[in-house]
Image: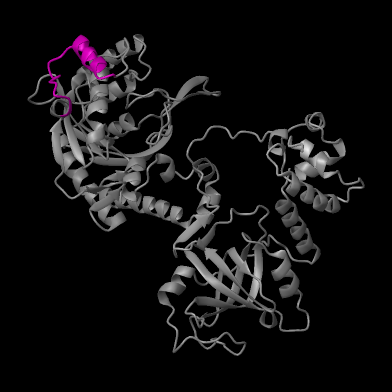
Amino acid sequence: MLSEQEVNRRQKREELMRMGIDPYPAELFDVTTTVADIRANFQPDGPETAITSEMDLSGDERWGNVQLAGRLMIIRISGSASFAELQDATGRIQVYFRRDDICPGEDKTLYNTVFKKLLDIGDIIGVRGHIFTTKTGELSVYVKEFKILNKSLRPLPVVKEVINEKGEKETYDAFTDPEQRYRQRYVDLIVNPHVRDVFVKRTKLVNSIRQFLSQKGYLEVETPILQPIHGGATARPFRTHHNTLDMTLYMRIANELYLKRLIVGGYDGVFEFAKDFRNEGMDRTHNPEFTQVEFYVAYKDYIWMMDTIEEMVEKVALDVAGTTKVTVGENVIDFKRPWKRLTMFEAIQEYTGVDVSAMGEDELRQVAESRGIKVDSTMGKSKLIDELFGDACEPNLIQPTFITDYPVEMSPLTKKHRSKPGLVERFEAICNGKEIANAYSELNDPLDQRERFEDQLRLAERGDEEAMALDEDFLRALEYGMPPTAGVGLGIDRLTMIMTNQPSIQDVLFFPQMRPEKKLEQSSESDYVEAGVPAEWVPALQKLGFLTVEQLRTANPNKLFNDLGGVRKKLKMDVPMPAIADVRSWTGQEA
């Protein structure tokens, strides 16, 4: 059911069409400037000038005749002259409308009817005029012509700002509910312009990384999203079915194995900004669809990769934030090189006081249980160590830190450590309590790789849904020979959270995954009748927004009585008004 405002806007749309004005014109509107351009470059000549019809800067080549377009955010009607605020992609500016300039002839319809009566907040218009500064110093556009470019049929949330008794600014009715903001991101971006800045910075971050890798001569590539085998990480995949091929396919959980195939093929360095998909839980740092950049470089190792990640992320901080020091919540995180480095066993011992380096599966399970970690029989040695590290260490690693030298069981695709038996050459970069990057000296021994895959198969047989699948084609590629290679995956979403000081991954994704939107419940006519409402008054109550009997029970009976009188007139209801006592009984508040 449409609200009163939605009905009113549709009526205005029809009225515009009856007047011969297309509220959705097809032809382009030639925008010659933006709000940001005006604010950055307009220099008024001499003192501020009163607004007069004689004031004309048409001789000014740059600012005497500009065209800009945007959304009306405020309208202040005042007789024959009015002010409004126009918002484009770069900011807001005041616009001034004067009836006799908009309508120089006898016909004043364009101002008196179209502007004053048929425009609403949220409508998109184009204006032509000149730039000036008011007596109060407000940069403005003096409008000579305007054109409706889009009639908005839904009202925007109206954010009100008032100054309280203490002189402080207070905001009311802001569009702040997270569920609404994430579900209706388009509204969020309109009424909360600071949200747009987050995504501008995200693009700067991606461009910074792309520039860094491209300048080093590495090739940006694309690899399959639909894969016959889910590989490259330990995670539960999404699966689908290809009808023509009659085969199961998986949405990729990582692009690692395909990028390594390209190293086998002869490229010295490749990278990809990849959308990956993992059919797992959702929380403030996990979304089932996420973005990471993976890159692989031949003839390098994980120590070289640590130096490279430090260099790259330091550059990203400078490009995005202008400094290596970034405020995240209550912490100031410094990405300046060098970062702290700890082995995984050193980190666990530092934060638990327990040396787990020589422990078997049973001892590890006991240590995990003693810390209140939930364990089960499907968890092998690697999973238990990972759970211990995640519980005891990760939350304490706020400054960027490299955790190195993982147990071999945790890393099926990583080269065995050159000097530490039982470990592999792997690091994770941890920052603000979460992993942001994961890197290896890549395993390139095809026989060792086969054994590791077979170990993963045994974990899968025990019920581990995240165990890695065996990829025969990848093994075949390794048998042709892959040079020593360093590889890394760096999470774009999590790094953006840190660089923009956002508490949740949903805040750095335009359209995060959401549960299905709940359908608005609505009581039937018989429900209202059962509550004592005559059937003829049900449409009036619904028109007022009381879509359920429960909502009706919360109404103020006196206000409802007065509102019903107004709706009765609007709907031209040929029924007598109910008594105030009747209305009280409908709301369950009988005198």
**Can you name the residue that lies furthest to the left here?**
419
Asked whether residue 360 is drawn in magenta, I would say: yes
Judge by depth and name the residue closer to the eye, 308 or 507: 507
Q: Residue at point 51% right, 45% down?
A: 181
Q: Quadrant of the N terminus?
A: top right
Image vertical order of residue 414 relative to residue 88, above or below: above
Spot occupied by residue 15 in the image (x, y as percentages of width and height): 78, 62
**Can you name the residue that lies furthest to the front here?**
591
Q: Quadrant of the C terminus?
A: top right
Spot occupied by residue 427 in the image (x, y as percentages of width and height): 20, 33
Q: Residue at point 71% right, 52% down?
A: 6
Asked whether residue 106 is drawn in magenta, I would say: no
Judge by depth and name the residue closer to the eye, 559 or 492: 559
Q: Quadrant of residue 100?
A: bottom right
Q: State the extent of the magenta-drawn residues as a range.
A: 351-372
Spot occupied by residue 217 in the image (x, y as percentages of width and height): 24, 48
Q: Quadrant of residue 74?
A: bottom right
Drawn side of residue 486 relative to residue 31, left or right: left
